[in-house]
Amino acid sequence: MLQETFNAARQAARSLNRRSAHEINALLLSLADAVEQAIPQILEANERDLARMDQANPKYDRLQLTDSRLHDIASDMRAVASLPSPLGIELSKATRPNGMTISKVSVPFGVIGVIYEARPNVTFDVFSLCIKAGSACLLKGGSDARDTNECSVALIKRVLQENAWDPSTVTLLPVSHDATAQMLNAVGQVDLIIPRGSKGLIDYVRDNSRVPVIETGAGVCHTYLHSSGLTSYAQEIVLNAKTRRVSVCNALDTLVIDRSRLNDLAEICLPLEAKNVTIYADEEAFSALNGNYSLLEKASDDDFGREWLDYKMSIKTVADIDEAIEFIEAHTSRHSEAIVAEDNEATRLFLAEVDAACVYANVSTAFTDGGQFGFGAEIGISTQKLHARGPMALPEITTYKYIITGTGQTR
């Protein structure tokens, strides 16, 4: 049973209330230095995880750490340290007719549990954001990243102890399904659970948790080329959104194109061929690309509303913006959607009517990321509407309480 583990995390969370913003920032800077010093050890652990996974697996890229990626992780921690504290912010204040003052103030959640799959970078991102927001964290990584996560958390615990912090501020739970079940039922000990991973994982957590959950949904992302859109914009945006990193949730899955722009489709898709992207096109788009694009397949209904996580994408032809919005509404995961258009009214309509956490005009969906939004890092991309939506960082992992002061008022 993990009751003692959860109790230790709760105790560590309480102790965080006595830590100053300066102490928290100093700890994060120490950890960032320690990560860079330990790059050989972390990469060695990561190699053991990678050796157990088929390189053709779409998760392989997410699992893989490199020297550059670890330097980026350290840089993200330094960025989080440089941000203002999200705690103790007075969100509102009012004085009642009887003289008592009511203030609404941001405070930590307490203990945050994060369940994730083959994403070892999440270990450092979650810890840095949780500690900055005054919460202890329980990490439930998948077996694919077992060695990397164990090495990373051991490093974090060492830095905590060297700086006289409670090592239970971070805990890596066993990879077993039983550990997940226990955390999902830890009412009164865990305050919030955030799942990061496949649709199956997220659905399981939402359906089985007795602890409040913030969903970070799958990313089925569309880019719509309106009749007024610039071909040059479309070509660059589609290439970047699809191929920058195919295994991430903000990658492009479906290009939606106005019928009037099919003559430009081959030019738009040309750079994708060099990246070995297979295109699954509907009948009209297939006819426009046939003979002009080698990695071409006819699309089935299952190829729309699908998160590819691979060098694959689909194309849907529509009559106009109304049909485009209707198609996206039927297939979106409400993550990130984009329009390429010069027509102001079409852009306004798309931005207003498309229901997603992030909606772009003439910008790649690859920017849906806490670091790109200036948040330092992210704890996930929320596709729900309650409490948090879009990239979640420091403000989204705090809550608030009311503080009432007076001079002896009674009711």
Image (cartoon, rainbow, N blue to C red):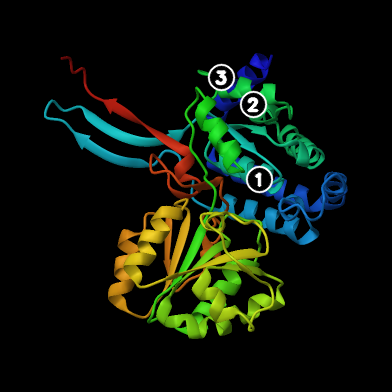
Quarter holding the N terminus?
Answer: top right
Residue 167 rendering spot, x and y as whole percentages: 70, 29
The answer to whether any part of residue 150 appears in the image is: yes
Give the alpha-carbon distance from disc 2 to disc 1, as whole Å.
17 Å
Say whether residue 344 is left or right of residue 69.
Answer: left
| Residue at the disc numbered 2 | 180
| Residue at the disc numbered 1 | 122
Asked whether 248 or 255 is in front, the reply is 255
Residue 369 rendering spot, x and y as whole percentages: 54, 57
Say whether residue 1 is left or right of residue 82.
Answer: right
Residue 372 rendering spot, x and y as whole percentages: 54, 62
- Please report contact status of discs 2 and 1: CB closer than 8 Å, yes or no: no
Say whether residue 50 is left or right of residue 381.
Answer: right
When the figure is inspected, residue 2 is found, relative to residue 125, above or below; the finding is above
Asked whether 284 or 216 is in front, the reply is 284
* Amino acid at pointer 1: Val
N-terminal label among 3 and 1: 1
- What secondary structure is found at the residue carrying circle 1? helix
Give the alpha-carbon distance from disc 2 to disc 3, as whole Å.
10 Å
N-terminal label among 2 and 3: 2
- Please report contact status of discs 2 and 3: CB closer than 8 Å, yes or no: no
Q: Say few, some or many: other residues with alpha carbon within 10 Å of mark 2 (under 14 / 14 to 19 / 20 or more).
A: many
Asked whether 170 or 325 is in front, the reply is 325
Question: Which quadrant of the view contains residue 326?
Answer: bottom left
* Amino acid at pointer 2: Thr
Residue 207 rendering spot, x and y as whole percentages: 51, 28
Query: Which of the numbered marks, if any, corresponds to residue 2?
Result: none
* Amino acid at pointer 3: Ala
Asked whether 78 or 67 is in front, the reply is 67
Q: Which residue is drawn at 23% across and 24% down?
A: 406
